[in-house]
Image (tube, grey):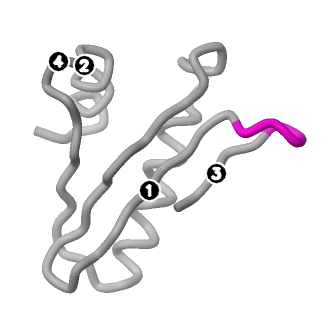
Amino acid sequence: FWLAADGDAVIGTVMAGYDGHRGWIYSLGVHPARREHGIGRQLLAYAETALRELGCPKVNVQMLESNAGAREFWRAAGYT
């Protein structure tokens, strides 16, 4: 679990895990007023790097299909 902060304010979070077979991004969120500034991409890159350093060969993402903004984010980040 990692946080992005601006001073004392939390502006984004990502939660990831690795079960020894595959990695998971369970949640990733950025404060609505701070979106479109690359914070989500930075959090994702940090989580992907941490998973890779653990030997993780594959990453799955959990998201609600009804969340159009999330679908767009994950597609733009290269996830299918």
Residue 75 drawn in magenta: no
**Range shown magenta:** 6-10
Q: Which residue is mark 2?
A: 67
Residue 3 marker: 3
Residue 43 location in percent, x, y?
52, 48
Q: Which residue is mark 4?
A: 66
* Between discs 1 and 2, the one toward the N terminus: 1
* Between discs 2 and 3, the one toward the N terminus: 3
Kindly identify the amino acid type of the residue bearing the numbered disc 4: Ser
Q: CA distance from mark 3 to mark 4?
A: 25 Å
Q: Residues within 10 Å of mark 2 (few under 14, many from 20)?
A: few
* Quadrant of the image occupied by residue 52: bottom left
Q: Residue at x 75, y 43 (%)?
A: 5
Q: Which residue is mark 1?
A: 15
Callout 3 secondary element: strand
Q: Residue at x 48, y 50 (%)?
A: 14
* Quadrant of the image occupied by residue 4: top right
Residue 36 location in percent, x, y?
54, 18
Q: How many marks?
A: 4
